[in-house]
C-alpha cells in the first residue's frame, strides 16, 4: 500500500510540475496582453456587476449566486492550509508570486466566465448547461468533442474521488475532533476500528446537511452559497485584519521580507539545489493556482447558470472570484503568518502554522482562537462539498446526456461518499483528487488559448457598446 501511495504522490508531483504551471501562466499572460490589462481597467466595473444583477437576463440563478457557488468551491482549505504550506516551503517571497499568479489568473477567469455564457445550451428539461466541455465542443467544433469529454471525465473523477467528498468531510471531522476531544477519551467501535464520538456525530451532521442541500440542485446550492460564502469570507478576513492591525508596526518588516524572498538569488537553505527565488516562485505560483483555480475550468461550470444575456458581463463577475480568493483572502492569511513568524517553526506543519499565527495575533485566549480557526475550516470545507457536487454533476451530465435518473442516482452516491469519508485514510485520496484536478486544466487551457480571439472580439464589442451608451447597466 505504501508503494502505491508513493507512486500516486510521484504522479501528483509530475502533474503539478513546471509544464502545467507554465501553461497556465502563459495563458494568463496572453489574455492579459490581448485584453489590455482588463483586470485593472475594469475591476471597478466588475465589482459593481458582482452585486447588481442584470435585468431580464436568462439563466437559472443570479450572477452573484453563480459567483458564490464558484467561490464556495474555491475559497476553502487552500486559503488556510495552502498559503501556510507555500510560505513554509518557499519562504515569505512565495506570497508575492502567489499574487502575481492571481493577477494573471484574473484574465483567465474572465475568459472562462465569458466563454461559459457564450457557448452554454439549454437541455430538453430546461436546464442551463455550460462549462469548458461546451465551449470546447461549440467553440472549437465537433471534432474537438473528445477534448471536452476528457475534461468532463477528469472533473467527475476529481469530485467523486475525494476533492469534494472524502477529503473535505475528513478535514471537518478531524478539526472538530482536535478541538473537542484531542485525547480521544470518548470512542466507539465502528467497521473494526475505534473512532471518537465527535467524529461520528460531526460526520452524520454534515452528511445530513449535504443531503438536504444537494438534492435540491443548483438553485438550492446557490441559495445557501449566497448566504454562507459572503459571511464566511468577511468573518475570516476580519480575523486576519484584526491580527494585522494589532501588530501594524510589523507590516513594513513583513513586506520587506516578502520582496527580498521573491527576488533573492541566494542559494536555498538546507542543502537544496536552486535559489530562494526559485523555490518562492514555484511554491507561490503552484499554490496560488490551486487556491483560486484560475485555468482549471471549474468556475465556468457555475458561471454558465447565471441570469445574464451578456457574456462579457458575466466574465467580469467571474473574474472577481480570483480577486476575492487570492488577492484578498490569501493575502490576509499570508500577512498574518509572516508577521507572526509561524512559518519559521520547524515543528509546525500545514494548518498548525495558521493556527499558531491566530494564537499569536488575535487578542483572545488560545482556546478561543483555535475555535475560530476550526469553525472557519469547517465552513470552508463544507461549502467546497456543495460546490464540487454541482461541478462533478455537470461533468456527469455532459458524459451521459443529462439524464435525470442518472443525476439523481449520482447525488446519492455523492452523499454516500461524504458519509464514509470520516472513516477512510485520505492521503492517497487527496493525491488522486489533486491529479485529476490538475489534469482538468490541460484541455481547458488549450481551449481558452485557441478561443482567445473570440474572447478579445467579444470584449471589444461589449466595451464599444458600453461606451456608446447602448447597454443598460
Image: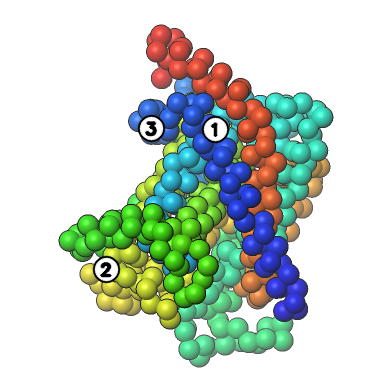
Residue 429 placement: quadrant: bottom right
Q: In this view, does 249 lie above or below 348?
A: above
Mark 1 = which residue?
Answer: 30
Mark 2 = which residue?
Answer: 361
For marks 2 and 1 on the same chain, the one whose residue lies earlier in the sequence: 1
Q: Is residue 153 above or below residue 130?
A: below
Residue found at the very far left of the displayed protein: 249
Residue 263 placement: quadrant: bottom left
Q: What element carries label 2?
A: helix
Foreground disc of the pair 2, 3: 3
Foreground disc of the pair 2, 1: 1
Residue 109: tell me if it is visible. no
Mark 3 burial class by Cα count in 10 Å: few <14, some 14-19, many 20+: few
Residue at position x 64%, y 62% in the image:
13
Alpha carbon separation for disc pair 3 and 1 = 15 Å
Residue 285: tell me if it is visible. yes
Alpha carbon separation for disc pair 2 and 3 = 32 Å
Mark 3 = which residue?
Answer: 40
Left or right: residue 129 compared with residue 94: right
Q: Which of 321 and 453 is in front in this view?
A: 453
Residue 269 place in picture, x, y as percent: 44, 72
Locate the C terminus by quadrant.
top left
Mark 2 burial class by Cα count in 10 Å: few <14, some 14-19, many 20+: many
Amino acid at each position: 500500500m505504501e508503494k502505491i501511495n508513493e507512486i500516486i504522490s510521484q504522479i501528483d508531483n509530475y502533474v503539478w510540475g513546471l509544464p502545467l504551471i507554465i501553461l497556465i501562466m502563459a495563458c494568463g499572460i496572453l489574455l492579459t496582453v490581448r485584453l489590455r490589462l482588463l483586470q485593472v481597467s475594469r475591476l471597478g466595473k466588475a465589482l459593481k456587476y458582482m452585486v447588481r444583477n442584470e435585468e431580464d437576463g436568462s439563466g437559472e440563478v443570479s450572477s452573484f449566486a453563480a459567483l458564490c457557488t464558484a467561490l464556495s468551491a474555491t475559497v476553502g482549505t487552500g486559503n488556510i492550509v495552502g498559503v501556510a504550506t507555500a510560505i513554509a516551503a518557499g519562504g515569505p517571497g512565495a506570497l508575492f508570486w502567489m499574487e502575481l499568479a492571481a493577477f494573471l489568473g484574473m484574465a483567465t477567469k474572465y475568459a472562462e466566465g465569458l466563454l461559459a455564457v457564450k457557448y452554454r445550451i439549454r437541455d430538453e428539461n430546461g436546464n442551463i448547461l455550460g462549462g469548458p466541455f461546451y465551449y470546447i465542443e461549440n467553440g472549437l467544433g465537433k471534432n474537438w468533442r473528445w477534448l471536452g469529454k476528457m475534461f468532463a471525465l477528469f472533473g467527475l473523477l476529481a469530485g467523486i474521488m475525494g476533492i469534494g467528498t472524502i477529503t473535505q468531510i475528513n478535514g471537518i471531522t478531524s478539526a472538530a475532533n482536535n478541538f473537542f476531544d484531542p485525547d480521544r477519551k470518548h470512542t466507539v467501535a465502528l467497521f473494526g476500528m475505534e473512532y471518537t464520538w465527535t467524529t461520528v456525530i460531526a460526520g452524520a451532521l454534515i452528511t445530513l446537511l449535504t443531503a438536504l442541500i444537494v438534492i435540491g440542485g443548483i438553485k438550492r446550492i446557490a441559495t445557501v452559497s449566497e448566504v454562507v460564502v459572503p459571511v464566511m469570507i468577511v468573518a475570516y478576513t476580519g480575523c486576519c485584519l484584526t491580527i494585522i492591525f494589532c501588530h501594524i508596526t510589523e507590516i513594513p518588516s513583513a513586506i520587506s521580507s516578502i520582496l527580498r524572498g521573491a527576488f533573492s538569488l541566494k542559494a536555498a537553505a538546507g542543502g537544496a539545489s536552486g535559489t530562494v527565488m526559485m523555490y518562492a516562485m514555484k511554491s507561490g505560483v503552484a499554490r496560488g493556482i490551486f487556491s483560486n483555480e484560475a485555468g482549471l475550468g471549474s468556475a465556468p461550470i457555475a458561471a454558465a447558470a447565471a441570469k445574464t444575456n451578456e457574456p462579457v458581463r458575466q466574465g467580469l463577475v467571474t473574474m472577481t472570484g480570483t480577486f476575492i480568493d487570492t488577492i484578498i483572502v490569501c493575502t490576509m492569511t499570508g500577512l498574518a503568518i509572516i508577521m507572526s513568524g509561524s512559518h519559521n517553526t520547524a515543528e509546525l506543519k500545514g494548518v498548525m502554522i495558521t493556527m499558531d499565527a491566530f494564537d499569536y495575533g488575535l487578542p483572545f485566549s488560545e482556546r478561543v482562537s483555535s475555535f475560530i480557526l476550526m469553525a472557519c475550516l469547517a465552513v470552508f470545507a463544507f461549502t467546497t462539498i456543495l460546490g464540487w457536487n454541482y461541478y462533478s454533476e455537470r461533468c456527469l451530465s455532459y458524459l451521459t446526456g443529462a439524464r435525470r435518473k442518472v443525476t439523481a442516482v449520482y447525488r446519492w452516491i455523492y452523499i454516500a461518499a461524504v458519509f464514509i469519508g470520516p472513516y477512510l485514510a485520505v492521503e492517497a485520496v487527496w493525491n488522486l483528487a489533486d491529479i485529476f484536478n490538475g489534469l482538468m486544466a490541460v484541455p481547458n487551457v488549450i481551449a481558452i488559448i485557441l478561443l482567445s480571439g473570440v474572447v478579445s472580439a467579444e470584449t471589444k464589442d461589449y466595451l464599444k457598446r458600453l461606451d456608446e451608451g447602448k447597454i443598460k447597466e
